[in-house]
Image (cartoon, grey):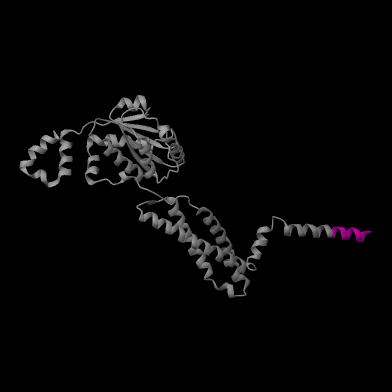
Amino acid sequence: MEAQILSAVLSAVAGQIAALFTGPIVAPIRQWLCYPFEYDKNMETMEKQLVMLQETIASVRNSVESARNNGEEIEDRVTTWLTKADETIEEATKVLRVEGRVCLNLMLRHQPSREAKKITQVIDEILENGRFEKFSFRPATQGIVTRSYKNYMDFESRMSTVKGLMEALGDANMNVIGMWGMAGVGKTTLARVVARQAKEEKLFEEVAMADVTQSPDLKRIQKEIAEMLDLKFDKKTVSGRASRLHERLSQDRKILVILDDIWEKLELETIGIPSKGCKLVLISRNRDVLVCEMDTQKDFGLEVLPKEEAWHLFENMAGDCVKDSNLRCVATETCS
């Protein structure tokens, strides 16, 4: 009887010990002990994934090069992905240089085997994140600003407006901003330079601009915005295009849309511009159109340049010809 009891106790103890060595508590220890014996498998798996990563990198770089040749700018996430992928390739290459593969010493095989498995997991994640739908975007045409335009922004009479616009663009609670003033005061120029500055300061990833004019052509407006966002329409109707544009502008991205030369109330939803999802700058000669018809949350008025500033701008743009005494009088009258 005592023998049976002792046998049962020993059996129970043996079962508990076996459970310990197969349970989750010792799983990391068991894995640690297995690394030397899984060396060949881990290295082979890493090499296979490494080849796939190299092929994917080559494909992404081809797309990036093609986009750059077309004058497009590369998405930040693509550049970041390529950097991470290159770093991982370098790490994997270092592991492959280890001569533990041909060595029977289990201790020498442990570390490279462990690193190979870790790198394989990293490669899997990189490959998953490398399925880009979009590699690049077309820079806004207003991105090219001449020196004279930059100097124009330095005028004291414009600096407060620039500062106010930049603050409004950076305000997360401000979606619709207006700018008004008579024809020729430089509203479009100021909007372009401010948009460029806002993009350089990473307030926006993309900027699109369209002219509304006195007789709005909705298809043309949609096309101008879409081209700057590198968006292709698969519909020909205004409503079909509006749906696609609305979807694009509603994405969780920093997009600035500038609508210039607005004469009367414009139904933004008809064009495909959502009330939320992108920042809007509306430009008009008439403040009432912006405030009363387009419901701008903040607006900025632009007056004509003071005489002295107007003359400096003319000198900057005209160059040496204004030094001619015969032309100076005419030039002075022009700026008055």
Q: In this view, does 6 lie above or below 186?
A: below
In the rendered image, is residue 241 in sight? yes
In the image, the segment drawn in magenta is: 1-10
Which residue is located at x 37 percent, y 35 percent? 218
Q: Residue 104: percent from the left, percent from the top?
A: 62, 75
> Is 244 on the left-hand or right-hand side of 4?
left
Give yes or no for residue 8 being in the magenta stretch: yes
Give the total number of marks visible in the rendering: 0
Q: Is residue 94 above or below residue 328?
A: below
Residue situated furthest right in the rendering: 1
Above or below, 146 against 92 in this view is above
Please tell me which residue is depicted at 42% across the width and 36% down the height of the picture. Answer: 238
Q: Which of 27 and 254 is in front in this view?
A: 254
The residue closer to the viewer here, 95 or 194, is 194
For the N terminus, the quadrant is bottom right
Return the residue found at the far front: 236
The residue drawn where x is 81% and y is 58% is: 13
Q: In which quarter of the image is residue 122?
A: bottom right
Q: Main secondary structure of the magenta part?
A: helix
The percent coordinates of residue 136 (x first, y second) are 41, 50
User: Where in the figure is residue 185, as x and y percent of width and height?
Assistant: 23, 34
Residue at left offset 38%, top offset 32%: 176
In the image: residue 238, left or right of residue 108: left
Residue 88 shows up from this direction = no
Q: Position of residue 252 (x, y in %)?
A: 47, 41
Tell whether 47 sits left or right of 63.
Answer: right
State yes or no: residue 331 in magenta.
no
Q: In which quarter of the image is residue 140?
A: top left
Figure quadrant of the C terminus: top left
Residue 107's quadrant in the figure? bottom right
